Amino acid sequence: MTLPSPTDPDAPYLAGLNPPQREAVLTTEGPVLVLAGAGTGKTAALTARLAHLVYTRRAWPSELLAVTFTNKAAREMRERVGRLIGQAVEGMPWLGTFHSIGARMLRRHAELVGLQSNFTILDTDDQLRLLKQLIAAADVDEKRWPARLLAGLIDRWKNKGWTPDQVDAGEAEGYANGKGAKLYAAYQARLRDLNACDFGDLLLHMLVILKTHRDVLEHYQQRFKYILVDEYQDTNQSQYLWLRLLAQERRNICCVGDDDQSIYSWRGAEVSNILRFEKDFPGAKIIRLEQNYRSTPNILAAASGLIAQNSGRLGKELWTELDEGDKVQVIGVWDGPEEARRVGDELETIQRRGQRLDDCAILVRAQFQTREFEDRFIAIGLPYRIVGGFRFYERAEIRDALAYLRVIAQPADDLAFERIVNVPKRGLGDKAIAKLHTLARAEGIPLSLAAARILDTDELTGAARRSLGNLVGDFARWRSKLDELPHPELARLVLDESGYTAMLQADRSAESAGRLENLAELARAMEEYETLGAFLEHVSLVMDNDADREADKVTIMTIHAAKGLEFDTVFLAGWEEGVFPSQRALDEGGNASLEEERRLAYVAITRARRKCFIIHAANRRIYGQWTSSIPSRFVNELPAAHIEAESSMTGGESLWRANWSERADPFANIGRGAGRGPGWQRAVSSGVFDRNASRGVIDVKASAVSLGNPGRGDIALGQRVFHSKFGYGTVAEIEGNKLEIDFEKAGRKRVLDSFVSVE
């Protein structure tokens, strides 16, 4: 193979690259930040840069450090570089994920942190088991302070690069009234005794070594002539500090990322790392990849207009040479079921046109949103797949809840009984369950009946007998209420009285809130069926819908799971305040979380190649209660020139569409594209609209033109008001009939003026 000269403009790896991509490849010396927008070919530029460094003999393959976030990304990069430089890629031992490279380094220097080179890397189950032992030894109530909560805190501290002695008192208060830091120290000591570490240690230990052993740091600073980092916007503090130490000497670090796609703060990512790159590396070259090869101009313009509302960004403008394409469709629907019906209708139309469902995706903000689509698609026979999670009825908490209901409906259902007999924990171990099986087999009776009979014996210990007796009594009582309570209400009662809800509430991990949402959605789903038996039969049919994994199917997934993917047609569901942006995110993180939610919306839109539908509902069931919704503020921020507004409601559509384009009263206060905005809801409540509930049809009366009401005149800035849910508060901002209120106990909330009273 003939190697090109260092300045050869016709090097094979440069073929097909646009000028900014070439600049990213050829600017080899000094710090470089490549701001790569969605769909701009950043992987091509990054792999070509690696090939260039080897081809031009600037470094041996073993002198390159190339870091990715996932094994999949590392494999893809290795394969693509291999196609460019052949077998030389095999000499790149330092191309991999942060964790794999950290482990490789740590095995060479393990003794410096009290480990041996053959240390074990614990998985999550082993980690939790160890923490439970330490929690018990510290006389901490694990039910009140779950091991999973402590594991999450320790992981966060390690992501920040904190050793136990660096955790301040405020952080330590997050667990067991200040015992968090001591338990963290005990955990680290126990890991050393076991010659083990967890995933967070792979970088944390190396960070400690690099800071405290100058010779090790200098060794790696000299070894790595060039450092390349993919997805730099996703780095946490520990990764950031690790990279900065390694790059200090030569300063030949190239980071590729997109500040507008930083969406993982919940797992430690800090967008500030990419925003301060120029401060960390003075004189850094900033190269922007802005030519998009994925999406149409209308889709890119909609995404760009939205993300421009964020203040914490470096800024870029995506463009493309593709045809203009369709405008982004913003669709208002009456409720969640209509949303699912509308998407199903569009997908069936796509099928009739001969297009593949594989090229279509439905992206949601939260997992509980998938249930409505799954049920609808089962009803119409539309094949689908859930990516990045279980199908709704396959999730552990849903299967547990269904098991309780199955035992109530059918006491002979041994599989269901066995699943939940000790969930939540009731002190019924393997021996007790084995005795139930023995009795059931001997007498030819179901496990639930065997449980009742064994209570009259001394086969079980006193504690186990009491627990089992309580459960048997509960099932008898719940079964007696089948004819007294609506089955959705019975489900809620069972989950509460069984202790299952309390178990999830005590689990303070990030996943527990989503599991509670799923259980609320389950109870809501039951309301659509006349009896418990009818609902359970429906679930059985849903669970059987997995015949052909390779068949053409529409993809349903969260927006987080969709990052890095692309589809011809994308449906973005649930764009309402409180759903997206997530109310929980706003409550916990304020403006920083709002900007991350907006980045998430930007990621969602830029997954679409040809068509993008954004859907918002006027009403939605959340936590089992109907809620009137206002469209997401993100809908209001979309640039009008690239949006086509549509309402699936009859009657009001033409007036609504006209005011979309004119930005004028009477709907000016509804919000940009918000066909089901607060003005519309106020009109419904005041009788301007007639609603046919069975068909979801709206008819506009002539008086609709009077809807240009900017809001109640008796509410002013600084006014003290009362809200039935959030209590007393002070009006901070007024936008039409939407209020930003600083509540005394609930913090700042965005509400409609019709829901507050003036003090």
Image: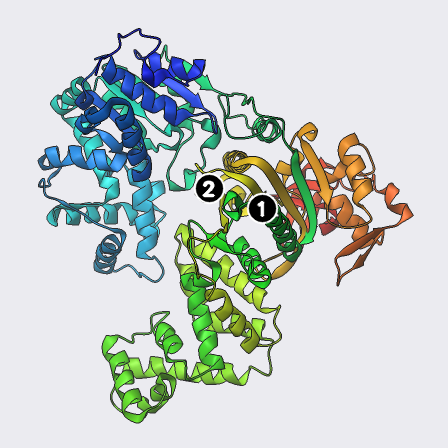
Residue matched to label 2: 562
SS at circle 1: loop
Residue neighbourhood size for the residue with mark 2, other residues' Cα within 10 Å, grouped as few (<14), some (14–19), many (≥20): many
Task: Name the residue at 31% across, 12% down.
Answer: 30
Residue kind at label 1, given as amino acid type: Gly
Q: Nearer the viewer, residue 46 or 179?
A: 46
Q: Nearer the viewer, residue 243 or 723?
A: 243
Q: Position of residue 37 (x, y in %)?
A: 47, 26
Q: Is residue 465 left or right of residue 491?
A: left
Indicate which disc, 1 or 2, sits on the residue closer to the N terminus.
1
Q: How many numbered badges does the structure rendering display?
A: 2
Q: Is residue 701 left or right of residue 3?
A: right
Residue matched to label 1: 354
733 over 446 or under it: above or below: above
Q: Is residue 451 left or right of residue 392?
A: left
Q: Position of residue 343 (x, y in %)?
A: 62, 50
Residue neighbourhood size for the residue with mark 1, other residues' Cα within 10 Å, grouped as few (<14), some (14–19), many (≥20): few
SS at circle 2: helix
Residue 314 visible to the viewer: yes
Residue kind at label 2, given as amino acid type: Ala
